[in-house]
Amino acid sequence: MKKLSKVSSDVENSIKLQFPFLQNVKENINHGEMGRAAISVFDHWITCENEYHLLDNIDVTEQENRNKKFLSHWAALFDAAEVFTVRYCGQWPHKEKLVIKQYTDKAGYLTQCRSKMSNSPFQFLIFPDFDCLYMASWDDTHHLYFNDRQRAEPVLRLAEKSGLHVIEYD
């Protein structure tokens, strides 16, 4: 089964109107007025040098445990709402265009969500129903950008049910 499908121009325009900073967030430039929270295997920000070992050279079993928590979260999100992502088409840099696609196959979606150290962030998701954008990162701390915190709450609750922590930005 095809894991990604092109969306109609109406759906694409609606998503772009809902998230005017979509491309900026995707490119990690500026999130505008969007609120944000982090979803992490850690219960606090890793800021001290003596905690950096938690990010590098992690035991294989520990990394697999972390990955299972995120996969559980992503599976729950797929079951709870429509999931979209973005792709670029055209020749860079002159005709590069951001295109919105919808995940239609859960197994294919979860394959794309698996941890990959080769490309960071390894997943960028759009949840119009929850009014939020989800950007995964290599360091086991992912970022949720939202227009309305209350509408994004189900994403945060599902993270906690999966054994993850919500960390607030100051």
Image (cartoon, rainbow, N blue to C red):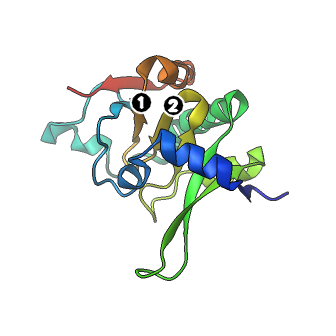
At 57% from the left and 37% from the top, the residue drawn is 127
Q: Note whether 39 is above or below 100 in the view shown.
A: above
Q: Is residue 113 visible?
A: no
At 56% from the left and 63% from the top, the residue drawn is 87
For the residues marked 2 and 1, what is the alpha-carbon distance in whole angstroms?
6 Å
Q: Is residue 57 visible?
A: yes
Residue 90 placement (x, y as % from top left) = 55, 78
| Residues tagged 2 and 1 counted as in contact (Cβ below 8 A) | yes
The three-letter amino acid code for the residue at tag 1 is Asn
Q: Secondary structure at mark 1?
A: loop
Q: Which residue is mark 2?
A: 131
Q: Note whether 75 is above or below 57 in the view shown.
A: above
The three-letter amino acid code for the residue at tag 2 is Asp
At 41% from the left and 58% from the top, the residue drawn is 120
Q: Secondary structure at mark 2?
A: loop
At 71% from the left and 54% from the top, the residue drawn is 8
Q: Which residue is mark 1?
A: 147
**Mark 2 vs 1, N-terminal side:** 2
In this figure, what is the number of numbered marks?
2
